[in-house]
Image: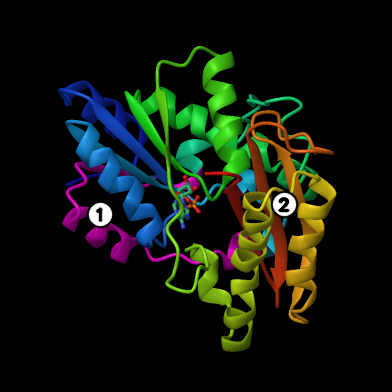
């Protein structure tokens, strides 16, 4: 497995690479969710490339950025064992020049949900993903459905800017009790870890009400709120029943819709999502 640390190294490795490349961008501290993306990328392309970069530009608070879990040497071992051909692990100053001043911003779609709670977050995500796509020029790039808004924002960026990369969504990987795998789960203390399953249970409650015929979005949101309200360690940021494409809040569900939520458990902010009817 090639380990690439500078932009000239990435460009040289890309020029030498033959066949199709499937890219898996990550912030590292890899878990089985990341590895589902890697498995899909390895299966569907001649080569799988991964990136590990904790992108300061997408973090609102310095604190969140500096406490984000990191273990690059373990990540590299796991990627190597999974058959990843090359990993790009840039230093921060390799990605952003001191006077960096160009950004990619997807309008509208980024105003709501995570965008409303974390101003500037998606500008950081789209800017770094666009840079990674330009450097690696992958045929396909793999993104998890857990980060449902991120997936839609990247699909929109690729469409609007005519980027020659297919965005491939991958199903959310969960713990046996339903908690979506996330690098941030490592911060959860034991009582918080137990309370964190309420995010999944809330989504399931909405899914069950939907399956039973409920189409009133307010009632579906209330079903999620009810589950979360029973957990004193969980502070709800938002619950949403939105149009699957625009992510605008719905009054009634008449077509493809997305249930999503964000909550702070102890001091750890977690998100999760589920497509209704899926
Ligand atoms: P991150 O390192 O958190 O930026 O995540 C890198 C990629 O892995 C993103 O496309 C995420 O959506 C995806 N991902 C994170 N957690 C999961 C999960 N539990 N299941 C599937 N994909 C995931």
Q: Is residue 84 left or right of residue 115?
A: left
Q: Residue at x 21, y 46 (%)?
A: 84
| Residues at marks 2 and 1 touching, judged by CB atoms closer than 8 Å | no
Query: How far across and down, in percent of the image, does residue 33 sit?
Result: 40, 56
The label shown at residue 79 is 1
The one of 95 and 31 positioned closer to us in this rendering = 31
Give the labeled residue for mark 2: 60
The alpha-carbon separation of the residues under discs 2 and 1 comes to 29 Å
Q: Residues within 10 Å of mark 2 (few under 14, many from 20)?
A: some
The vertical placement of 122 against 134, above or below, is below
Instruction: Give the mark toward the camera: 2 or 1.
Output: 1
In-front residue for pair 156/121: 156
In magenta, the rendered stretch is: 64-92
Pointer 2 residue Cβ closer than 8 Å to ligand 1: no
Q: Residue at x 28, y 33 (%)?
A: 9
Q: Quadrant of residue 99?
A: top right
Residue 97: tell me if it is visible. Answer: no
Q: Does the magenta-highlighted stretch encompass residue 260?
A: no
In the displayed orientation, state which residue is furthest to the front. Answer: 212
Between residues 144 and 62, which one lies in front from this camera angle?
A: 144
Badge 2 element: loop
Lower position in the chain sequence, tag 2 or tag 1: 2
> Is disc 1 placed on a helix, strand or loop?
helix
> What residue is drawn where x is 65% and y is 29%?
245
């Amino acid at each position: 497995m090639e380990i690439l640390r500078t932009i000239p190294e990435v460009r040289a490795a890309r020029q030498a690479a033959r066949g199709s490349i499937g890219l898996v961008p990550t912030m590292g501290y890899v878990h089985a969710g990341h590895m589902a993306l890697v498995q899909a990328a390895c299966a569907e392309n001649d080569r799988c490339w991964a990136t590990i970069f904790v992108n300061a530009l997408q973090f609102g608070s310095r604190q969140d950025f500096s406490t984000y879990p990191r273990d690059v040497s373990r990540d590299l071992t796991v990627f190597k064992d999974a058959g990843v051909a090359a990993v790009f692990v840039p230093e921060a100053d390799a990605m952003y020049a001191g006077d960096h001043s160009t950004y990619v911003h997807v309008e509208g779609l980024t105003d709501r949900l995570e965008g409303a709670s974390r101003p500037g977050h998606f500008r950081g995500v789209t800017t770094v993903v666009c840079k990674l796509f330009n450097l690696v020029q992958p045929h396909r790039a793999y993104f998890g459905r857990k980060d449902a808004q991120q997936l839609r924002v990247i699909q929109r960026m690729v469409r609007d800017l005519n980027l020659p990369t297919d965005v491939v969504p991958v199903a959310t990987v969960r713990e046996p009790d339903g908690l979506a795998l996330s690098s941030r789960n490592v911060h959860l203390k034991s009582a918080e870890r137990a309370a964190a399953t309420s995010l999944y249970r809330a989504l399931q409650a909405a899914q069950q009400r939907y399956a039973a015929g409920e189409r009133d979005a307010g009632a579906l949101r209330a079903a999620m709120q009810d589950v979360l309200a029973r957990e004193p360690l969980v502070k709800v940021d938002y619950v949403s029943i939105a149009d699957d494409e625009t992510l605008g809040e719905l009054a009634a569900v008449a077509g493809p819709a997305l249930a999503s939520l964000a909550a702070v458990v102890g001091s750890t902010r977690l998100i999760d999502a589920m497509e209704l009817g899926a």
